[in-house]
Amino acid sequence: MPFTIYLRGKIWHYQGTIAGRRLRGSTRTSDKERAQRIAAEKEAREWKGELDGPGSILTFSQATTLYLDAQKSDRFLLRLVSYWKDTPIRSIKAGSVRQAAIVLFPNATAATRNRHVIVPTQAIINHAADMDLCPHLKVRRFPVERKEKEPVTWEWVQKFMAHSNPHLGALCCFMFLTGARISEALSVHWEDVDFSEGKVLIRQTKVGSERKAHLPAVLVAALANIESNREPISKVFKYSSLHTARPQWRKVFKRAGIKPLSYHACRHGFATAMLRKGIDPITVAKLGGWKSAQHVFTTYGHAMNDETLTDRIVD
């Protein structure tokens, strides 16, 4: 049955049947001529989807809804949805995705363009592809010049703790000995800490899952020295965000006489120290909450500047 329009209040609605499927909806307009045009376009799209397959009419906006309905991360999506809007998925090619990254982030680094545009756009389209709604999309990323970042060491952490307040020192120790990201550490509540078992529940914001991390004795002691009411719903670390902690974090460098390093250098140090102690990348990835052991190896597996290490072959 061809689509027809009818009034509901002051707004025109449409209804009709496509291949036995009864469809209805709002045109969102009180203008009759515009409503007739919207209904006709809707009918044409539905027939195209019926005859040529769902991928012929699937839009980026619809694919994003499917992606979020599957409980996928919404990081970086707002700007993408605003850019692509109702662009048909069939017209989004690898080149147009790379161009979108340049348009949206004209002065950004290659890593930012990859992370904020290419990766999430590709993830949304490929999620729809997994549902047999469109072809998979592969986009070549912008080349990134990797700079070796310096990790903190246990000696660095000890000096930091000796010259900072208990909250900040415990935070530094916590990130180094659990591999937690700064956002994850600041989200830990006292109800997440089990001193009797020496465990802490870490909600992994970046990968959308949880893990239980071991608390070494030195970290238990650092946490125990924090002055707090210990209410279950209270945060372990008093800082509301990484920005509020940063000024105090930076002041410690001069007092302790240590090199200025970032929060993430603690997580970096966790991985590097574990790898140098002979722990395999798969185990390090599991303990630190990384999805990929390959990422751990390539990012944190620094070469050791000691030519005498070859002696170990025959030791």
Image (cartoon, grey):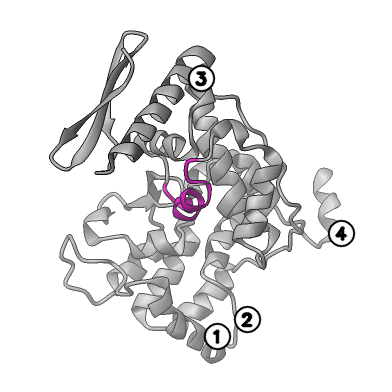
Camera-nearest residue between 5 and 263: 5
Which comes sooner in the sequence, label 3 or label 2? 3
In the image as oriented, which residue stretches furthest toward the bottom? Answer: 255
Q: Residues within 10 Å of mark 3 (few under 14, many from 20)?
A: few
Of 283 and 216, the residue lying toward us: 283
* Badge 1 amino acid: Phe
Q: Earlier in the sequence, mark 3 or mark 1?
A: 3
The answer to whether 23 is drawn above or below residue 67 in the figure is above
Q: Which residues are magenta?
A: 74-86
When the figure is inspected, residue 172 is found, relative to residue 7, above or below; the finding is below
Residue at image coords 54%, 65%: 264
Q: Secondary structure at mark 2?
A: loop
Which of the 4 image quadrants contains residue 285?
Answer: top right
Residue denoted by label 4: 307
Dot label at residue 253: 1
- Which amino acid, by three-letter code, is at mark 3? Asp
- What residue appears at the point 59 percent right and 75 percent down from the top-left corner? 261
